Image (cartoon, grey):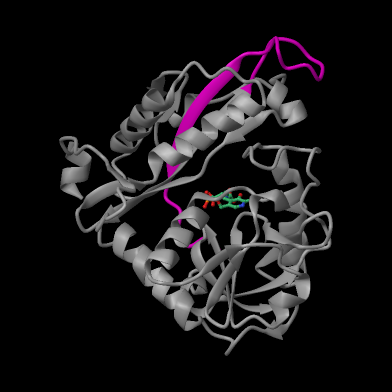
Amino acid sequence: MGHDIWFNGKLIPYEDATIHVLSHVVHYGTSVFEGIRCYNTEQGSAVFRLPEHMRRLLDSATIYRMPCPYDLEALQAATLETIASSGLASCYIRPVIFRGTGSMGVNPLNNTVDTFIAVWEWGAYLGPEALEAGVDVQVASWNRMAPNTLPAMAKAGGNYLNAGLVKMNAVLNGYVEGIMLSVDGYVAEGSGENLFLIRDGVLYTAPVSMSILPGITRDAVIRLARDRGYTVMEKQIPREALYVADELFFTGTAAEITPIRSVDKYTIGSGKRGPITKTLQEAFFDIIQGGNDPYGWLTPVPVTAPTEAVAAS
Ligand code: PPE
């Protein structure tokens, strides 16, 4: 069935990776997590920005006062071990730190802090055609959380109750995704992606003060764009700027760089992937597919001896 899961320090069979119904996380959403991708590059399997993801995971745990017994190095080693044991050349990686059993009630301080890492195969997040054709989206009627309610910088399980409402409405209305506005009505991000807008050759994206998740793909795209001579500005984007954009795209580990071809049935640009979006996708794919790594963003997965089953296939 599924691949072995690294649970509190060791790999265990998929079937055995279970938790108790009275775990704190089940009742109160007390988990922090990451989404990371391992790519089968032309130079071998490699994980994209592994230290940056694990640092954000530990930051999320710190914000929620979850003392994780594993440090940055240990989490990276555990990830590589989990991938290697799966035999997958490319996969999505999901590390989670959560509050387990101990006592009931809101206070999590007396509950266990448990850590696991799972891997699975995951294709294009917003549909197989999306990376080229682009997606149709709507502005969500649910806002991103206000500052000083839930910490937006933490990638916490509970945040995704809000994201789930946005995603369900979008899908039930016939769209692929919803764009959330901040509490004061500026563009924030998608339910699981950051957003970039292009107008007259300049890239705009919401600042972290708009309660966005500070995306690692967002950071990579800012870097790739600036190094190609584009101006990138982190500033407040009014909702209506979406409707008159030349190009729009989402960024995220799962979504990678996905063009947006319409918002609220306004056609964006020519209704197809725009030229700057394509340039940035190509730069990104040169790293994750080609394995060319000018920024040091790839961590190679150590090659293990193939098992009989793998060798036979
Ligand atoms: N905003 C949100 C709310 C978000 O969940 C993600 C990642 C991003 C921005 C982009 O961040 P980064 O991956 O560091 O570039 N969303 C993850 C979870 C998706 C899911 O459905 O689960 C992801 O892309 O892995």
The vertical placement of 226 against 159, above or below, is below
* Position of residue 108 measured from the top left corner of the image (x, y, whole percent): 72, 17
Residue at 40 percent of width and 75 percent of height:
279
Looking at the image, which is closer to me, 250 or 127? 250
Looking at the image, which is closer to me, 298 or 122? 298
Residue 120 lies in the magenta-colored region: yes
Q: Can residue 277 be seen?
A: yes
Residue at 81 percent of width and 38 percent of height:
149
* Position of residue 73 measured from the top left corner of the image (x, y, whole percent): 37, 26
* Position of residue 17 measured from the top left corner of the image (x, y, whole percent): 51, 26
Main SS, magenta residues: loop
Specify the quadrant of the image occupied by residue 168: bottom right
In the image: residue 134, left or right of residue 2: right
Specify the quadrant of the image occupied by residue 75: top left
In the image: residue 44, left or right of residue 199: left
The vertical placement of 186 against 22, above or below, is below
- The residue lying furthest to the bottom in this view is 270
* Position of residue 145 measured from the top left corner of the image (x, y, whole percent): 78, 47
Q: Which residues are magenta?
A: 99-126
Residue at 62 percent of width and 48 percent of height:
213
In the image: residue 46, left or right of residue 24: left
